[in-house]
Image (cartoon, rainbow, N blue to C red):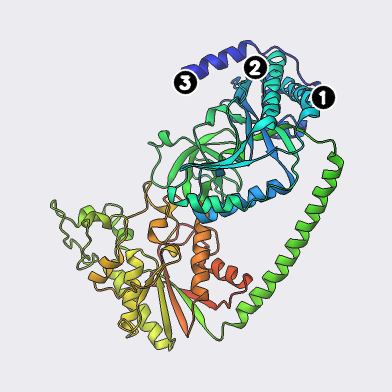
Amino acid sequence: MAAGETQLYAKVSNKLKGRSTPLLLEPLLAMGFPVHTSLKALAATGRKTAEEALAWLHGHCNDPSLDDPIPQEYALFLCPTGPLLEKLQEFWRESKRQCSKNRAHEVFPHVTLCDFFTCEDQKVECLYEALKRAGDRLLGSFPTAVPLALHSSISYLGFFVNGSPADVIREFAMTFATEASLLADCTVKPCTKQLHLTLAHKFYPHHQRTLEQLARAIPLGHGCQWTAALYSRDMRFVHYQTLRALFQYQPQNADELMLSPGDYIFVDPTQQDEASEGWVIGISQRTGCRGFLPENYTDRASESDTWVKHRTYTFSLAADLNSRKDGEASSRRSGEFLSQTARSLSGIQALQATVARKSVLVVRHGERVDQIFGKSWLQQCSTPDGKYYRPDLNFPCSLPRRSRGIKDFENDPPLSSCGIFQSRIAGDALLDSGIRISSVFASPALRCVQTAKLILEELKLEKKIKIRVEPGIFEWTKWEAGKTTPTLMSLEELREANFNVDTDYRPVFPLSALMPVESYQEYVDRCTASVLHIVNTRLQDSVLVFHSRRHPNCESRLRAGFLHAATAGAAAPGVRGFCPAREKDPFPGHVLL
């Protein structure tokens, strides 16, 4: 624990004398929980119900920090609701899909009124009173419409709030800060600078134009009911990464964390020296316990996903009317879901009806050399001056030339000798089956392009059909070691190495657009877009698609892409698959296409 935190916790511990909230606190005390842990549980759950606080206490029974008087951090935001919020959320989704994730996606749409500050657990109720007093004082003068002006720069895009409405909102923030200081003894810093609602922050410069076009499409004429919302977060994990568990995991050792889908894990990137490759050390938000966990069972979560909403103040005198509108909107959403389900069923039927006409064969690559010889395979077959030699018969006879030398093979390994043999046998089996191939798409991974070439050779089609390299079906970059995507062979290098690749093909997802450590949703989105493109290609006979890796406990992303195509109305083909080399699967029960 840092020295500053220790002093703060000691200060809070000495001041643990204050008023409580009997209606919520008494049931916890009656069960034998101490006052300080009961107050901590109430603060951590937003002081909503004693049942939620009790569940938190049960979950944290083994939390080593349970008795530490660690306060929550609080912040006040002005949040849009209704049609404007829906349009902003739509912008969030589209900007993430088209331009990848940026810092703005970490938090919901908001205008910051007060930066994060600490408050003792027994005085949180005073913050609620401060919010109510500030709201009541400014309710009559709060603007009926908050004007938003779009502002754009090379690394920021958002709406500015100007003029007299901005002055009123700042006055509300200052009033809350004053009341919180008087009632809860908190040091609150209200926002005195330019009020803004961030749309995108710290994005790639070449995405600026696309983001601006999406932002200009947001209609600002709709009425909006604004709500001041008080949120809290755990101050210990401000600079940590937040992971969300995707799958169940049962610990195999005493120092491992148990994971349930939806659990949030806080990970300090600077404290991972003890973790083996593919594992991380984290702290569970649900239990407070620390331990190892498999990183591929998780996905990156947004910063605000673990924040807790405490109280809100809505600047409207027509709350009942808006509640009715929200109910109607909910009904409409339910109706949309039913219609989408019906479309999905009809789409799948259409997919099944086309199987007889044309099909797509999804092929996994053959045995890769690093699977047999481990991560240090390149050191085993290279001389000090960077030349390749064959130390074992299962190493390939030679490696293709790469402009940056042999080291680039480390994270883009070739097939082993057995992998080459497996690929040729698979091609021979395809030839015997009588299946006619008209197109071939391959991941840019060398092992996939090699497998495609070898199978085409057995089909006697290596000169007639060119391999279309599609980076969009490359494996999940989170599987890759390091913080950058592996250096893959360019089309020119592949051609020099005698691979018949299609240099005129324009991929849906360029190689330069692959993002390191992308989220699971980003991975699914790019695979779906690439598969939709393959499906919409003029298909004659069958198409071979060579991909690079499976993912645990989930249906193949390629099959999902074809189902997406069907629901989108595309003439989706039948899907079959095979694998020249069945690698040892760390996830038993997973079915390959």
Quick one: SS at disc 3? loop
First-in-chain label (2 vs 3): 3
Please name the residue shown 30% across and 74% down the image.
Answer: 421
Q: Which residue is mark 3?
A: 2
Left-right relation of 347 to 504: right
C-alpha separation, residue under disc 1 versus residue under disc 2:
24 Å
Mark closer to the observer (1, 2):
2
Which residue is nearer to you in this view: 534 or 146?
146
Q: Amino acid at mark 2?
A: Cys
Quick one: SS at disc 1? helix
Quarter-of-image position of residue 429: bottom left
Residue count near mark 3 (Cα–Cα under 10 Å), binned few <14, some 14–19, many ≥20: few
Where's residue 23, x and y in %?
A: 82, 24
Q: Amino acid at mark 3?
A: Ala
Where's residue 92, x and y in %?
A: 59, 49
Where's residue 460, x and y in %?
A: 32, 86
Q: Amino acid at mark 1?
A: Leu
* Above-or-below relation of 265 to 587: above
* Above-or-below relation of 299 to 240: below
Please name the residue shown 69% across and 17% down the image.
Answer: 178
Quarter-of-image position of residue 150: top right
Q: Which residue is mark 1?
A: 23
Q: Which residue is mark 2?
A: 186
Which residue is nearer to you in this view: 530 or 274?
530
Determine if residue 230 is in view: no
Left-right relation of 379 to 141: left
Quick one: SS at disc 2? loop
